[in-house]
Amino acid sequence: MNKTKLSSIWIILILAALLLGACTPASPTANPVAPTQPQDQPATADTQAPAAAPTQPSAEQPSGERVTLNLISNWDAGSDPKGKVLQTIAQDFMAANPDVEIKIEIVPDTDMATKVETSFLAQQEPDIILHNWLGPSKDWLADGVVVPLTPYIKEWGLEGKFKESALSDFSVDGELAALPIEGFNWPIWYNMDILEKAGVAAIPTTWDELTDAAQKIRAAGFQPFVIGGKDWTGGDWFLTVITAALGNEQAADLFANGGFSQNADAKAFVEAFVKMRDAGVFADNVEGLEFESMNAMFFEGKAGMVHGGSWSYAELPKELDGKVQLGGIPLPPNAKGATKPFWYSSFEAKGFWVTRNGSAKLDTIQKFAQFFFQDKYMASFVEQTAMVHPFTNLEYDASVLSPLFVQSLALDVDTVEHASVAWAPTNVFDAWYDVTANAFVPGTSAEDILKAMDDLYQ
Amino acid sequence: MSVAAKTSTTRSARASRSRLALRRQVTFWLMIAPAVLLFSVIMIGPLINMFRVSTLDWRGIVKPSTFVGLKNYLRLFQDVHFYRALANTGIHLAVTTLVVLPVSFMLGFFLSQRPAGYRFLRTVFFIPGMLSAPALAMIFLGLYLPDGIINHYLRLIGLDNLVHVWLADRGTALGAVIAVDLWGGIGWYTVLFFASLSNVSKELYEAAQIDGASYWTLIWRIAFPISIDFFGVMVVLLFLWVLMGSAQNVLLLTGGGPGDSSLTLGFYLYRQAFANRFLGYSQTIGVFIFAVGILGTLLVRRITRPRFIS
Amino acid sequence: MATFLRSNNRIFGGRRQTSLWVNYAVAGFYALLILVPIYYVFISSFKSNQQIFAAPLRLPEVWDLVKYFEAQQRVNLLRAMGVSFYITIASEILTLLAGFLAAYAIARIPNRFARWVETFFSMGFLIPAFAILVPVFLLAARTQLLYKPIFLIGFYSAARLSLTVILLASTMREIPRELEESAVCDGANIFHVLRHIIFPLSRTGIATVMVLNFIEIWNEYLFALILLNQETRTLQLVIPLLRAERVSDYSIIAAGLVIAVIPVVLIFVLFQERIMQGLYSGGVKG
């Protein structure tokens, strides 16, 4: 054997190693599991489940052997009261069912889609996912990541337990993608002390009244309306209001296809927004504020109004007890989608999803789901975490609830959709927040904003 | 040695020499094998895959993909965001290189003269390099937020008109991101230059001083020419670090905004992959970055050193 | 200080030592720019959220370690730290083994392809990390090694090989050939040469490379996120979990960050001199 031949052999081996590294399938179509078939018949659970069967050996064990349910969530028992309730449910369930082990994996919310989808690709996804109906998760049903739960509501004895609106929040084309767990509402919080000091007689119900109130509040030395212009707090406010301004039909069309610059109502809305921004209705430096700094400003009594969600009711500091009144978002001019102050409230905050892998363990999951959705646990969620529950009726101890939460449940406001959650394609969903963040920056013109919106749909 | 003795030993000597040579070759390939195989499979393989995926229209990791040839590249060259990112990255590279390298070189020279306290300074300068991305994020958010440290103290000393919303102001967002790299880069490269310049013999400086050289001359007329090769390597390292690493800081601080004012090429790749989920297109950007990396490296090395590799 | 001034006074200018003071001013200012934020994170771990926002740089009133215990209790920091150590050290060993051998071969064995191999490894610097994330993940999935730490260890080793091989090769080239040649003449085989000559003499280069690798691997987040599972979470993966879903307690996050950086600082402090020496010999040649 001479030198050249030896070198050539090594070169061939190296090339082989390169090819091994390079030749990984670029798409899951190379995997034996195909995406789900088109679903034109709702009640075909029997034919669906086997088609989506996993290929890894975690199939349903014969009874008597230990079954493991893998659950993934962002509710961390260490830092989140919801996590503690979840942990309690799991522990109680395991105590009542010694042959089942529940393993809970905690992943931050922002990483959840990546985690779920990458593990799906490796055929190792968890059996149950607790996640919201937002962005990527909206495609999970169509992509075969999760199985439809439409027939199981009846089979599992949960019929009539959930509100219709909650179920439809997690439904697409008549199929139920997940069982609803967590709802929320999202009003405007008014610091009545500040409003009084500023001489604002009543809670504003229109943008004109809002602008007026803002000016008075500023004159009294406070910040008017604080919101996190830089992140989702400002973005979600904007996207809720635009839905109310455009009405569902127009909003659905524009958010699916673009074309904002050519739409008269959209133009009018953006112009009104810019006018309001430039009139100083928002707190100073709103474009740099985020969720935490927004809360800090309101909780410290520096701002008169904030757009706060139900997740924050329990955080209200004692100093503001009794001083905060809730109301809907004031109406933009010529609003087509609402007739009185409105809010975005839905049950999309958390759902109980069953994955392709989980569909092989349906017997066990049925037991767990029935256990999970018992009244007593939902009542715990409500009492301990100010959660808006999706049940048609539920008894819980109202005396432990935060006063704001109680107030919110009695509000008379219109409910509108959140335009990009409802209609924007997944690829565009995150990018919308860049557009809204930009909109809050002083100096951005209405044309700029409209153009940025249309750019998303190129 | 007699000619006869020479020729009689030559054949066996040659045989054993060639056996030795063969053994050396085998040794060479065996010794590099583990590293080369590991590297090929885990780094080079995926790199090649990046080229392949860049020709796909692939809209989400669990969705099917379709081959579209060079369509992504056509899209890239018509993409307004891409050009913005390109411009921003250009600015980022220019500012970082022009500030970090001269300053680090001078500080490194200073430290290499072993002034009192040099060890302490050296340790402090190295600290930014030891911090992870979450740590950096927490620090700089604490500094840049509207009610963060910088604004807090500006207001305190009465410089209210300098107060900015650093991360959300179109004029300052990119600068705020670049500042993070300057903060860490200067320290890191100072330590590296310190190490290199410590090898320069003191006699050179003393000889120049006898001829009346000033401090400035010592640095730039003596130390710099000697270190030009090392300096070139540092330029390449800095170039690649900024080009490839910008995504983390942009992600944690500004998200590319407002508008596209702090969008860099690295972050654009990340955004296309994880936020917009256009996986094929994101790899196209990756290929472009890779090409820029190679070109930049070749260019710098050609300028600072005639040979191709060290 | 006086001795130093006298012996170096020519370098820093005449009697007034202007360059010296200018240099100290600049260096001192920059050092302050580094220390103040670090100080801020450190003291934040002893305060409450309110105190952090109200007076960011004021010293805490009470040096209470409660936040550290809370951080540990919330996400089991110590276990995650253990995992990080395991993965980092295993990667270090693998990198060193493969890299040391390859570096020697490139530096000392005459071969037509040596230069090509070195260039091959330097390609590693040109690879954008975010770009190969998806293909690397697919590779893990395909080889059934997903979520197994061994794959991440292999990945980190591969990623660090570029720097390791090139730096070590550089260091080894400095070793006088005569030492090896005399050993070979005395009948030593290659293992002997490696163990008793090359290895001791490259200690500084090795120390440098190991410290730099330690820092990079210890701090890495994205690939660990994709390639690991709940049971084998590294420290960097659990720290973001200290942020609750809605309202964050910054002091706990600060405590977590302090804990996360301590090992890195310790290692650096312990190996400082070795690193500097390693950078001289490896650094000048680049």
Image: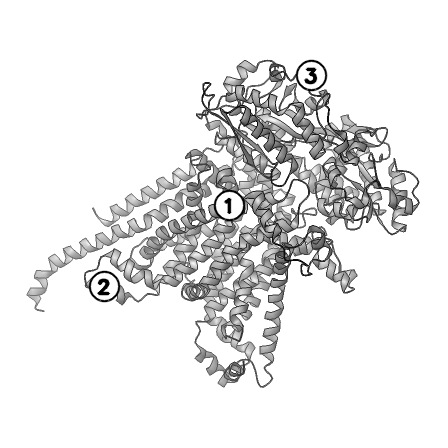
Q: Report if the CB atoms under discs 2 and 3 are less than 8 Å apart.
A: no
**Which type of secondary structure does the marked residue at label 2 adopt?**
helix
User: Where's the C terminus of chain A, which quadrant?
Assistant: top right
- Classify residue C167 as left or right of residue C61: left
* Residue C183 numbered tag: 2
Residue designated by label 3: A160
Residue sitting nearer the eye, A236 or C54: C54
Q: Residues within 10 Å of mark 1 (few under 14, many from 20)?
A: many
* Residue C80 numbered tag: 1
Q: Position of residue C29 (x, y in %)?
A: 63, 68
Which subunit holds the residue at mark 1? C
Q: Residues within 10 Å of mark 2 (few under 14, many from 20)?
A: some
Front disc: 2 or 3: 3
Which subunit holds the residue at mark 3? A
Front disc: 1 or 2: 1
Q: Residues within 10 Å of mark 3 (few under 14, many from 20)?
A: few
Q: Position of residue A260 (x, y in %)?
A: 75, 34
Looking at numbered disc 1 in the image, what kind of residue is underneath it? Ala
Distance Cα–Cα, label 3 vs label 1: 44 Å
In the image, what residue occupies the spot 51% across and 61% down?
B235
In the image, what residue occupies the spot 43% across and 55% down?
C163
- Whether discs 3 and 1 lie on one chain: the answer is no
In the image, what residue occupies the spot 45% across and 22% down?
A65
Looking at numbered disc 2 in the image, what kind of residue is underneath it? Ala
- Classify residue B284 as left or right of residue B163: left
The quarter of the displayed image where residue B81 is located? top right
Looking at numbered disc 3 in the image, what kind of residue is underneath it? Gly
Q: Report if the CB atoms under discs 3 and 1 are less than 8 Å apart.
A: no
- Classify residue B38 as left or right of residue A245: left
